[in-house]
Image (spheres, rainbow, N blue to C red):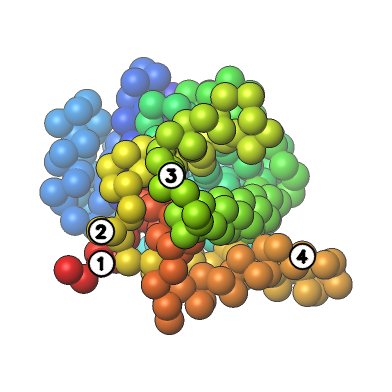
Amino acid sequence: MKVGMIGLGRMGANMARRLLRGKHEVVVYNRTPEKTREIAGEGAIASLTLDELLQKLPTPRMIWVMVPSGKPVDDMMEALLPKLSKGDILIDGGNSHYTDSIRRAENAKQKGIEFLDCGTSGGVWGLEEGYCLMVGGNPDTFKLVEPCFKTLAPPNGYAYMGPAGSGHYVKMVHNGIEYGMLQAYGEGFEILARGRYPLDLAKIAELWNHSSVVRSWLLELAVDAFKKDPGLKNIKGYVEDTGEGRWTVQEAIDQSTPAPIITLSLLARFSSRQTDSFSAKVIAALRNEFGGHQVVAAKS
């Protein structure tokens, strides 16, 4: 298939590369041309403007947008919709709020444009391991784009969730669960680090990945993080949040659904910005390992 990829950050660039490996034709555009030229050097078709990207795609066009959530997505939609033709397909693969995706799908529909919201998980490892894709929108449009989903995801790694907004809704809760898992690992390793024995945390994380009930990919990443910096001395215990945890907690409140673990893990991130705890260091290190999220360096 021939697909346009707009936004070549950590996720978008590697998604373009994975599509290229799957023998798709990929037309790329990034706000800064240096990244466009870099991916073009790996086989993509470069576009230095949105108009150029649209000209290089056959109709109906398929355009995957990977820009930060919120205003950047709205700005991109505003720039693209007047230029698109009936039947063209827009896919938002970022971490948008599901209510925004419902609104954007309706706006696109009024102009005859198809819109899919695609919750995307996999971080910086997605290029090699594949991306987990949670897709909302028109089921017939989903089927049209399915060859791309198959290439981007590992076996059984993508699925249709339901109508507009459902893909980003499922990804929102996915990230809320992630908050709780990270918090549990962070607190457990802090107890070990401050405990009565001089323990090798990398060795323990490696051990737990063999038949332990707490084994996981996050624990595998903990091994890597502790091997690089056993005491996490080079990381400040400052943990950012990108919005999905807040949205999940708000949804739980709106439903009157008790979600104490996810709620407290969000609040723990707030407290990490006031103190420098070891558990926060663990969470910051793991987020850097799986998603390339920037860490705040500890002051020497």
Which residue does the numbered mark 1 point to in the structure image? Answer: 298
- Mark 2 residue crowding within 10 angstroms, few (<14) / some (14–19) / many (20+): some
Mark sitting earlier along the chain (2/1) = 2
Q: Is residue 198 left or right of residue 156?
A: left
Q: Where on the picture, by quarter, is residue 234?
A: bottom left
Q: What residue is rendered at 49% in x and 37% in y? A: 205
Q: Are marks 2 and 1 in contact (CB under 8 Å)?
A: yes
**What secondary structure is found at the residue carrying circle 1?**
loop
Image mark for residue 259: 4
Mark sitting earlier along the chain (3/4) = 3
The N terminus: image quadrant: top left
Name the kind of residue labelled 2 in the image.
Answer: Asn
Query: Residue 211 location in percent, x, y?
Result: 63, 24
Query: Residue 39 location in percent, x, y?
Result: 21, 36
Which residue does the numbered mark 2 point to in the structure image? Answer: 234
**What secondary structure is found at the residue carrying circle 4?**
loop
In-front residue for pair 266/3: 266
- Mark 1 residue crowding within 10 angstroms, few (<14) / some (14–19) / many (20+): some
Mark sitting earlier along the chain (3/1) = 3
Q: Nearer the viewer, mark 3 or mark 4?
A: 3
Q: CA distance from mark 2 to mark 4?
A: 33 Å
Image mark for residue 199: 3
**What secondary structure is found at the residue carrying circle 2?**
loop
